[in-house]
Amino acid sequence: MSALGTLSVVFDLDGTLVDSEPNYYEAGRRTLAEYGIPDFTWAEHERYVGISTRETIADWRLRYGLSASVDELVAVKNRHYLELARTKTTVFPEMRAFVERLADEGVRMAVASGSSAEAIDVILSGTGLDTCLRTVVSADEVAQGKPAPDVFLEAARRLGAEPADCVVVEDAAPGAAAAHAAGMRCIAVPYVTAQADAPAFATAGLLLRGGQTEFTARAAWNWLTGTARRS
């Protein structure tokens, strides 16, 4: 058994393990431009951080009065995103170090993401994270995306872990809310640090208000081992 005992760790992907939000923003900008909506801004994109692609696009249809179907828009956005993701995805160095430390210690891990299964696969294989992270759940595979707990509960099921024995690593408020709803502890690393005061982040066991600039593999490991001893 690992130093963490029965604890398992479930990672969000986008904005947590990898800095993919610039790619999602650019894919969204290109998609909306194709449908006659110019000048989609980064500030507008930020409101969708942590929300699944399908739910983001459902909101776009209402907000921008788009007549195309959700399925069509998802396909177009995913095409743009995958073109970018294959060559321009950066792993946060301390997150990679954390994943590798957990793998070395034999800790069970999963990825639970709002992205499509294809996008998750492209990123994990392209960055080499797939060697450590083999259990993957896409929001497309469950009834509801975050802030509903479905993706995290499914990840726990696939790991053979109890929700109470899972710790989620998340960058977005909807993800922190989903972890809490799933009965899981959470390490919150806000991608948009200005949102660190969001009520959902207050439920996190460890909140790193400075986001990735504050996160270190050592500090996260020390918090986890302390949590394991108290369990």
Image (spheres, rainbow, N blue to C red):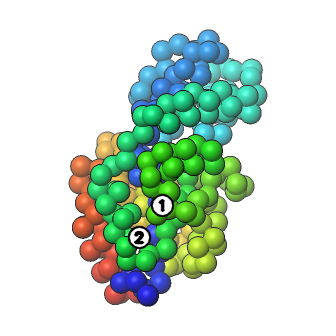
Q: Tell me, yes or no, if residue 202 can be seen here.
A: no
Labelled pair 1, 2 in contact (Cβ < 8 Å): yes
156, above or below 87, in the image: below
Q: Position of residue 196 (x, y in %)?
A: 33, 50
- Tag 1 residue: 131
| Near-viewer residue (90 or 162) | 90
- Left or right for 53, reference 92: right
Graded by Cα atoms within 10 Å as few (under 14), some (14 to 19) or many (20 or more), the crowding at tag 1 reads: few
Q: Position of residue 70 (x, y in %)?
A: 72, 32
Question: What residue is drawn where x is 50% and y is 36%?
Answer: 86
First along the sequence among labels 1 and 2: 2
Q: Position of residue 74 (x, y in %)?
A: 67, 33
- Left or right for 10, reference 218: right
Query: Which quadrant does the C terminus fall into?
Result: bottom left
Query: Which quadrant does the N terminus fall into?
Result: bottom left
Q: Quadrant of residue 220?
A: bottom left
User: Disc 1 to disc 2, how far (Cα)?
Assistant: 9 Å
| Near-viewer residue (89 or 33) | 89
Q: Which mark is residue 103?
A: 2
Q: Secondary structure under badge 2?
A: helix
Q: Tell me, yes or no, if residue 69 can be seen here.
A: yes
Amino acid beneath label 1: Thr
Amino acid beneath label 2: Ala
Graded by Cα atoms within 10 Å as few (under 14), some (14 to 19) or many (20 or more), the crowding at tag 2 reads: some
